[in-house]
Image (cartoon, helix red, strand yellow):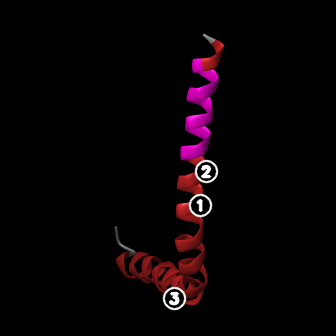
């Protein structure tokens, strides 16, 4: 590994880029996360209950 400096710089650039990207999009994604995770959990729960009801009525 003779090109250690090159590797280090190429490893730091995407990290800084990702940090900037995360910093830019975090305020947008945070409300989406808070709104959609309960909605997705409720939908999954309703879907699971409907599947259970369907199985119960089928037998």
First reached walking from the N terminus: tag 3 or tag 1 = 3
Quadrant of the snapshot with the N terminus: bottom left
Q: Which of 19 and 36 is in front in this view?
A: 36
The residue drawn where x is 59% and y is 65% is: 36
Left or right: 23 with respect to 47?
left
The residue drawn where x is 56% and y is 37% is: 48
Q: Which mark is residue 52?
A: none
- What is the x, y in percent for residue 31? 57, 79
Residue of label 1? 39
The residue drawn where x is 35% and y is 72% is: 2
Residue of label 3? 23
**Label 3, label 1: how far apart the Cα atoms are:** 25 Å
9 to 47, vertically: above or below: below
**Label 1, label 2: how far apart the Cα atoms are:** 6 Å
Residue of label 2? 43
39 to 34, vertically: above or below: above
Element on which disc 1 rests: helix
First reached walking from the N terminus: tag 3 or tag 2 = 3
Which is closer to the viewer, label 3 or label 1? 1
Element on which disc 3 rests: helix
Left or right: 26 with respect to 54?
left
User: What are the residue bounds of the magenta stretch?
Assistant: 45-56
The residue drawn where x is 60% and y is 20% is: 55
């Amino acid at each position: 590994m003779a090109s250690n400096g090159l590797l280090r710089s190429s490893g730091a650039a995407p990290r800084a880029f990702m940090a900037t990207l995360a910093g830019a999009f975090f305020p947008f994604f945070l409300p989406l996360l808070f709104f959609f995770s309960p909605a997705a959990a409720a939908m999954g729960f309703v879907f699971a209950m409907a599947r259970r009801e369907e199985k119960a009525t089928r037998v």
